[in-house]
Image (spheres, grey):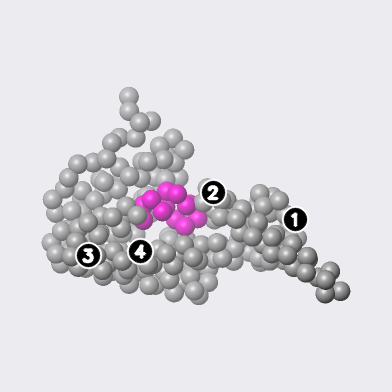
Amino acid sequence: MTDLAKPLRADAERNRQAIICAAGSVFAAEGTSVTLEHIAAVAGVGVGTIYRRFASVDELVGVVLEEKMRRYADRTEAAAAAALTEPWEAFRDWVLFILEQQATDLAFSDVLLADGAVSEPFRAEMRRAFRASVQLVNRARSAGTIRDDFDHSDLLLLQHANAGIVRGTNRQAPEAWRRFGDYILQSIRVNGGPLSPVPEIWVR
């Protein structure tokens, strides 16, 4: 009986990994407004199989994106530390990092802008990232590299705007987020610089 159980456990783990892998691809391309049935089809498993392992899309989102949120929090803390010596560069690179994450993973963008998080570990990483981003903004502003009237909450406006741009232009101009980021950074920085090129699709 024990020998027969081992391959079943191995199959179950393979199915779980197939579901997580498929979910990562689906979430990145389509965001969180998908169904478990759709993910099951992409993973090549039955609907019953996916429901035995994940009760909801939110639960699966938590599993797929928890590690990414941890890396996001690490990156934000590193930016806050770098702002002690290179305030503008640290702030600029971190803003562009956020915009790029939104452009390359729609689900991550959705979760960043959601009212609630999917699990306590996920919420803990979001809080860690938030605290570090406040430090980053304060240090960049105190150094005189960004506008005195720039508020930390303006980052949320930036992310919401970029989410709309990404969803509206991603197929035709996947790099549009970069030019948008340059415009925003120009408006935030005390002394601006050049913009990135106009997306080719828009050049007439």
Q: How dense is the environment of label 2, judged by Cα within 10 Å: few (below 14), some, or many (20 and up)?
A: some
Q: Is residue 37 visible?
A: no
Marked residue nearer the N-terminal end (3 or 1): 1
Q: What is the quadrant of residue 168 in the picture?
A: top left
- Amino acid at pointer 1: Gly
Nearer mark to the viewer, of 2 and 4? 4
Residue 81 locus on image (x, y percent): 26, 68
Q: CA distance from mark 2 to mark 1?
A: 21 Å
Marked residue nearer the N-terminal end (2 or 1): 2
Nearer mark to the viewer, of 2 and 3? 3
The secondary element bearing badge 2 is classed as helix
Residue that mark 4 sits on: 75
In the rendered image, the vertical position of residue 40 relative to residue 138, given as above or below:
above
Q: How dense is the environment of label 3, judged by Cα within 10 Å: few (below 14), some, or many (20 and up)?
A: many
In the rendered image, the vertical position of residue 156 relative to residue 125, given as above or below:
above
Q: Which image quarter holds the C terminus?
A: top left
Nearer mark to the viewer, of 1 and 4? 4
Q: Which one is nearer the viewer's eye here, 128 or 152?
A: 128
Marked residue nearer the N-terminal end (2 or 4): 2
Q: Which mark is residue 30?
A: 2
- Amino acid at pointer 4: Arg
Q: CA distance from mark 3 to mark 1?
A: 49 Å
The secondary element bearing badge 3 is classed as loop
User: Would residue 195 appear left or right of 129 to someone viewing this image?
Assistant: left
Q: CA distance from mark 2 to mark 4?
A: 25 Å
In the rendered image, the vertical position of residue 163 relative to residue 203, given as above or below:
below
